[in-house]
Image (spheres, helix red, strand yellow):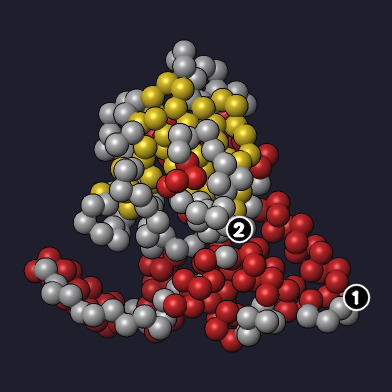
Amino acid sequence: MTNLNLGCGTRYHPSWENVDLVPAQASIRRHDLRRRLPYPNGAFAAVYHSHVLEHFHPQEAPGFLRECFRVLEPGGIVRVAVPDLEQIARVYLVALERADAGEAGWDVNYDWMLLELFDQCVREEPGGQMLAFLLQTSPLQAQLAYERLGDEARRALDRPRISIAPQPASMSKVLSKLWRRLRDQAHKLLFSRADFAALQVGRFRQAGEIHKWMYDSYSLKRLLRRAGFQEPIRRAASESGIARWASFELDADSTGVAHKPDSLYMEALKPVAGRGSGGQ
């Protein structure tokens, strides 16, 4: 396997090395991306991660990208997909102007764009206000949200309704669940109700769902250069310098429709002759 997919979630390809903190199936390697990647230098021709970088604190992101640099072979490609802050800001301004002018339906679009800007940075429970918006607003009223989310809107709405058949729990999972229950009971005895609620919020915000930063094309190019990469270039969902990219259907389906239309896609190269200056 010459290509590495980090933080793959449920979107992966069997010809790639796929990694996630909570593997969706047995062939995916379990690893916490905050730690050093468990691969030797120059092991892969391509490293890809989609909607992962924004979950790193901005002070942690350079270290993560340097790890991507390390495991790439010289001349290898890193491909990064993140929410596109510039596009969000531009659509928000349009929604603000048209809602303020009283155009029909744009009050709903304005509400949605505010959520795109802030919700995944500030939420304190799974799904946040974005999920509540999708559950409470008809697809016709929320057309802009569905257009911008693509597959993710359907996946978000399906998740609360999916009934998963119980699986036999391993002894370690049983003990872990028991420990968490005992720990919470002890904390409820030790802390006030307000302090215990604050502890629960803190645990959620450290669990990986929230966004800790946002990127536009300029800031992402600069970050990649500082990690040692060269020639950062913006790509379309189905376009790449990675061989046979479209066939993997990681960012777009077989017809070229993007899975996450609100994304910024960018690729950069590891220099062939050493690390290089990295740029500023």
| Labels 2 and 1 touching (C-beta < 8 A) | no
Task: Tell me the mark number nearer the camera, choosing from 2 and 1.
Answer: 2
Task: Name the residue type under label 2.
Answer: Pro
At 28% from the left and 29% from the top, the residue drawn is 40
Mark sitting earlier along the chain (2/1): 1
Viewport quadrant of the C terminus: top right
At 18% from the left and 75% from the top, the residue drawn is 167
Instruction: Report which quarter residue 43 is drawn in.
Output: top left
In the image: residue 187, left or right of residue 271: left
Task: Name the residue type under label 1.
Answer: Ala
User: Which residue is disc 1 drawn over?
Assistant: 101
Of 16 and 104, the residue lying toward us: 16
At 51% from the left and 27% from the top, the residue drawn is 269
In the image: residue 51, left or right of residue 137: left
State how far apart marks 2 and 1 are (Cα): 27 Å
In the image: residue 198, left or right of residue 145: left
Residue closest to the far right: 101
Residue closest to the far top: 273
The vertical placement of 134 against 257, above or below, is: below
Residue closest to the far front: 255
User: Which residue is disc 2 drawn over?
Assistant: 261
Viewport quadrant of the N terminus: top left
User: Percent x, y for residue 113?
Assistant: 69, 68
| Residue 11 visible to an observer of this rendering | yes
Of 58 and 113, the residue lying toward us: 113
Dot 2 surroundings within 10 Å: few (below 14), some, or many (20 or more)?
many
